Image (cartoon, helix red, strand yellow):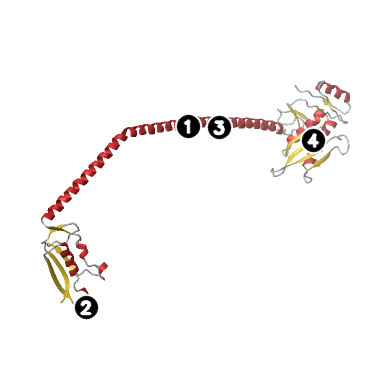
Amino acid sequence: MGFFFWKNKNEDSFVDEILDDIFNDDEEVVVMNEGIPYDIFKYFVKTVAMRNKRIKSYYISDWIVYCEAISNSGLTSWDFKVDFTDLGGYPEYSISTEKSTSTLPEYFAKEVIDLVDKYRYGEKKVYTSENDIYCWKCGKLNSKEDPFCNYCGAQQDRLEESYVKLKLEQERNESERIRVQEEEIRQENEFRERQAIRNVELAREQTRQEEIRQENTKQRRKFLLKLTPFIFLGFLFSLGYIYYQEIQQRSREAAIIKAHHDVDDIQLTFNNFDFENTESNKNNPVKYNSVKSDFENAGFKNIELQKQKDLGFFDRKKDGNVISVSINGDSSFTEGDWFPEDAKIKITYHARK
């Protein structure tokens, strides 16, 4: 419930009586020399501060007002102080400021003094209810529900109401921020718990796989140990079989050699490539007489020499070079081949015309 009283300059006793009714026994009303109640002064300061958008924050200590102001750019802030201790004297206030070029502190102080003067020298209602507001133009008290002043018709300032809404919005935003933060923390904790569970399960699975691997290795070792005697026996059998095959092969070769010796066959110790003349041996060519000696030394009896007179005067160095060698008409023979001792050996070589 709000209380109001009208005060004229000659009604001091009436003011005191009304003030005693407004404030209970536990609250002390501070009145200055000019009769300004301290709570009324604080409300005047609040009204001016809320009305000025550049006042970011303020607080009151006794009759001194400390303000934080926003710069014109809105990027920085600065402080100033207005001392109303000598409200009834001259000057009625003093200013201390961090920004001497700004007129905002002076404007703020004059606005407060203007409301104080209207309270001092005119008909004034003592404001005691938060449902009422002083008019920013004439200083008269109006209901907050009235869009216009009932005395001068000025549109009422809603900064205080906007400030309350802003504070409520800030509180809601802060509550939402805290809720979101708590939700993020909860989700993070749940994620960590799930991750920890997955890590434990992964460690268990790795342990289980390792146990399975070790068990499989153990089983393989046991199996190999059981197979070892059979492997050893198989190895011995393989060695015996290889040895037997080797003996059989040697026996067959010995029988073949004996059979050839029985009919006086000759086994070659050279092949047809040994008698070829190529670029690689042009400085030491194979001569027919050396080939003839090789066959005679091997035991061959039937050796035929055939000249091929195809050399001119300038080719005399090739005289006697072997052209081809054949055994029974076959010019492809290898070391180890068997031939009868009367096989026909034909040696063809170059000769001068």
Q: Which of marks 4 and 1 precedes in the sequence? A: 4
Residue pointed to by mark 4: 65
Secondary element at tag 2: helix
Write the residue at 15% across / 68% down.
348
Count neighbours of disc 2 (C-alpha within 10 A) and say few if under 14, some if 14 to 19, many if 20 or more. Answer: few
What's the amino acid at mark 3? Glu
Q: Nearer the viewer, mark 3 or mark 2?
A: 2
Separation of residues labelled 4 and 3 (CA atoms): 47 Å
Whole-Å distance between the Cαs marked 1 and 2? Answer: 93 Å
> Disc 3 or 2, which lies upstream in sequence?
3
Q: Earlier in the sequence, mark 1 or mark 2?
A: 1
* Up-down relation of residue 104 to residue 335 (above or below): above
What residue did someone put label 2 on?
314
Q: Position of residue 168 (x, y in %)?
A: 66, 30
Dot 4 and dot 2 residues touching (CB under 8 Å):
no
Q: Is residue 91 left or right of residue 331?
A: right
Query: How much space separates mark 4 and mark 2, taking CA atoms?
Result: 134 Å
Residue 227 appears in view: yes
Task: Name the N-terminal-most of marks 4 and 2.
Answer: 4
Q: Amino acid at mark 2?
A: Phe
Please tell me the numbered disc located at residue 188.
3
Image quadrant holding the C terminus, namely bottom left
Three-letter code for the amino acid on which mark 1 is drawn: Ala
Give the label, 1 or 4, closer to the camera.
Answer: 1
Tag in front: 1 or 3: 1
The circle drawn on residue 38 is none
Q: Pointers 3 and 2 in contact (CB under 8 A)?
A: no
Q: Which residue is mark 1?
A: 203
Q: Residues within 10 Å of mark 3 (few under 14, many from 20)?
A: few
